[in-house]
């Protein structure tokens, strides 16, 4: 492949998206772009399909890590652009292609300008969207052997002016868990429902009664649940349903309040299942810790922005969406920042969303300034 600039790399990544945990070609291409830059260590894979490159100056100093994400979303792209996704039903609608391009541009600068002491590493992490990737990385022995001293990441934020940096001390993103509640009875002929155990009534009562149960907990308004899917029985007029499933997401800015909400939901479901002689099975999916920024690293970001003349805005409230960078911040000090991607930019996960190329250099410059300040 011809030598590409950061924008061209972003377009290639956008055109070839892959879902969480299946980022084979994305990871392979990242490795191909990194190898000529001769990192001291190039670990691929680590923690599943993630890629980690480390440049070591050979002199004592901090080890600073920057992270981007590899995965795309199961969304059909509707935007008409020449580098549109070639993979049907999959597209980069969260901007991970742009985040990777920022780190690739940073890698070039690391090599061209060098570091005088310490280490810098770039983590291209798999499976962020499902909340599984960061946990797999930090559990990998390779991560434990090369544990960084600090970690930084960014996420583009539509609705804010281009190049504006969005900062927030403490919680930056909410914790969340996906729940599946399976109510199991048994089928019967639809003309003889009394001979079966149809979970419809239990599910209906669960949905109606849960708001009051949660209200009694006195939780913060940012601790809440959203029912996302309900399925009951099979598509048949002759069979009374024997199983029913409720999917829901719970989220909070507090890991403690998350536990309280989860307990209330499970208790409500168990009581109703027991009353109607049903079996309840609860499973958890796509679990995210709250992403909580560390004070010192938050100040590091603000200082670097001031040096570069970048506008910094303080988010008045944490984001209610989740990010698994919180797993890294539970391990090492660090911070996640927002990078404005335009007031007219389509929102994240929208079929017309596209990462703006003009902020690639902004992100890379900011990360470089943070790096030289810390080293």
Image (cartoon, rainbow, N blue to C red):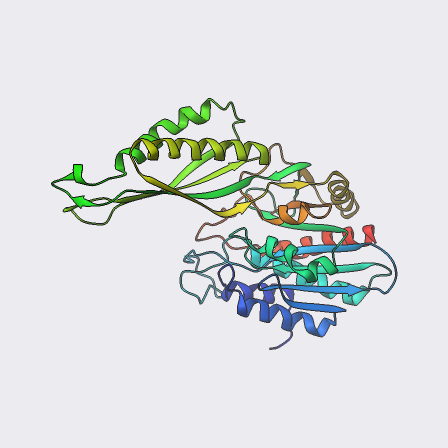
Name the residue at 40% across, 64% down: 88
- Out of 155 and 188, give the one closest to the viewer: 188
Name the spot of residue 175 as percent of width and height, x first: 56, 40
Q: Is residue 347 above or below residue 194?
A: below
Relative image position of residue 286 (x, y in whole percent): 50, 48
The answer to whether residue 254 is seen in the rendering is no
Above-or-below relation of 284 to 209 = below
Say which of 287 and 152 sits in front.
287
Q: Position of residue 178 (x, y in %)?
A: 46, 44
* Residue 13 horizontal/vertical position (percent): 55, 65
Quadrant, the C terminus:
bottom right
Q: Of residues 271 and 342, which is closer to you in this image? A: 271
From the viewer's perspective, tell me whether residue 106 is left or right of residue 231: right
Residue 219: in sight, yes or no?
yes
Q: Quadrant of residue 189?
A: top left
For the residue pair 199 and 68, the one nearer the viewer reads as 199
| Residue 50 picture quarter | bottom right
């Amino acid at each position: 492949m011809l030598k590409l600039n950061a924008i061209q790399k972003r377009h290639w990544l956008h055109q070839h998206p892959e879902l969480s945990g299946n980022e084979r070609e994305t990871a392979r291409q990242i490795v191909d772009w990194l190898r000529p830059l001769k990192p001291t260590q190039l670990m691929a894979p680590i923690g599943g399909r993630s890629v980690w490159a480390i440049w070591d100056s050979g002199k004592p100093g901090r080890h600073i890590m920057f992270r981007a994400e590899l995965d795309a979303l199961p969304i059909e792209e509707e935007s008409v652009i020449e580098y549109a996704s070639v993979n049907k039903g999959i597209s980069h609608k969260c901007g991970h292609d742009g985040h990777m391009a920022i780190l690739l541009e940073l890698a070039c600068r690391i090599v061209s300008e060098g570091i005088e002491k310490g280490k810098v590493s770039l983590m291209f992490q798999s499976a962020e969207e499902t909340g599984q990737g960061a946990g797999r990385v930090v559990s990998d022995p390779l991560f434990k052997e090369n544990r960084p001293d600090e970690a930084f990441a960014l996420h583009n934020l539509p609705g804010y002016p281009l190049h504006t940096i969005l900062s927030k001390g403490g919680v930056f993103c909410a914790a969340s868990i996906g729940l599946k509640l399976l109510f199991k009875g048994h089928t019967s002929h639809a003309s003889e429902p009394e001979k079966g155990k149809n979970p419809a009534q239990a599910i209906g009562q669960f949905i109606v009664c849960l708001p009051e149960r949660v209200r009694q907990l006195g939780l913060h308004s940012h601790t809440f649940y959203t029912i996302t899917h309900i399925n009951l029985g099979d598509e048949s007029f002759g069979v009374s349903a024997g199983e029913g499933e409720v999917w829901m997401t719970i989220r909070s800015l507090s890991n403690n309040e998350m536990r309280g909400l989860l307990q209330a939901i499970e208790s409500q479901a168990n009581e109703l299942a027991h009353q109607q002689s049903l079996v309840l099975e609860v499973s958890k999916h796509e679990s995210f810790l709250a992403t909580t920024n560390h004070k010192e690293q938050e100040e590091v970001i603000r200082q670097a922005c001031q040096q570069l003349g970048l506008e910094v805005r303080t988010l008045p409230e944490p984001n209610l969406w989740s990010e698994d960078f919180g797993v890294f911040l539970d391990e090492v000090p660090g911070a996640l920042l927002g990078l404005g991607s335009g007031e007219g930019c389509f929102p994240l996960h929208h079929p017309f969303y596209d990462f703006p190329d003009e902020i690639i250099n902004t992100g890379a410059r900011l990360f470089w300034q943070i790096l030289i300040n810390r080293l």
